[in-house]
Amino acid sequence: MRCEIFDPVVGPAFDVQGDDGLLFSNRDSGVWIMTGVSIDWHGISPVIVDLLGEGGPHGWLVVSPWVPGADKLRSDLDALLGAPTAHRDLIAYEFIAAAATFAEILKVRERRGGWASGEWLLATFPAKHQPIIDRTKTDVLGGFPDGVLIANSRHIGCGLAVSEHQQSLLIASTQQVSGVSLQRLVSTVHAT
């Protein structure tokens, strides 16, 4: 397990460069970022649930489910969160953010294969927001799920993207999520 922290105040900077220059900087956006490989998100779910809870009352889940198991995964999520909105190969859910809901989402992910279940983005917003999912706007930032998370970073209170090859990206607004909670996350990840 490896992780790297990008603090908007003390650094280092997390920048995404494009053909036309800088597309994103965590320093400009005021967001704290942790990237990681092989982090056991299910194993540290109480910490993630707390962080997401601090991020705001509006929950958002987007999944690109993998086969086999995509139909069962979608059925489980539909039962938990209601009818999704489809965006090409992605399914998206909006819901009222609650600790119990986050915990159940993480349990469904683990039960349906964990890392082998697909690519996931779980986020909370402090205010109602229509998330940017359009691939023409997000592919330049890294595609799904990381690029979608980055494209929405100015609105997200806290968000977690889990993608291929056991890679993760966590973004937290320093205006929404406390430094104590972020430090707890770092300590918990390093302890596992």
Image (tube, rainbow, N blue to C red):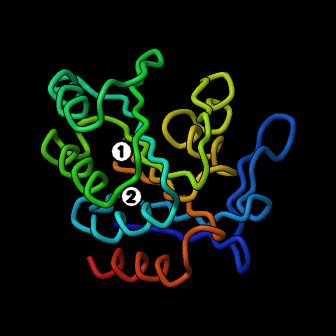
Residue at figure coordinates x 47%, y 19% from the top left: 87
Mark 2 residue crowding within 10 angstroms, few (<14) / some (14–19) / many (20+): some
SS of the residue under disc 2: strand
SS of the residue under disc 1: helix
Residue at figure coordinates x 49%, y 39% from the top left: 145
Measured as percent of width and height from the top left, residue 8 is found at: 71, 70
What residue is disc 1 on?
A: 165
Camera-side residue of 20 and 57: 57
**Marks 1/2: CA–CA distance:** 8 Å
Measured as percent of width and height from the top left, residue 84 is found at: 36, 25
Question: In the rendered structure, which amino acid carries the disc numbered 1?
Answer: His
Question: In the rendered structure, which amino acid carries the disc numbered 2?
Answer: Val
Question: In screen coordinates, is 100 left or right of 69?
Answer: right
Contact (Cβ within 8 Å) of mark 1 with mark 2:
yes
Question: In screen coordinates, is 176 left or right of 100?
Answer: right
Mark 1 residue crowding within 10 angstroms, few (<14) / some (14–19) / many (20+): few
Q: Residue furthest top?
A: 88
What residue is disc 2 on?
A: 37
Camera-side residue of 1 and 9: 9
Residue at figure coordinates x 56%, y 33% from the top left: 143
Would you place residue 91 above or below residue 4 in this image?
A: above
Would you place residue 66 above or below residue 41 in this image?
A: above
Q: Quadrant of residue 64?
A: top left
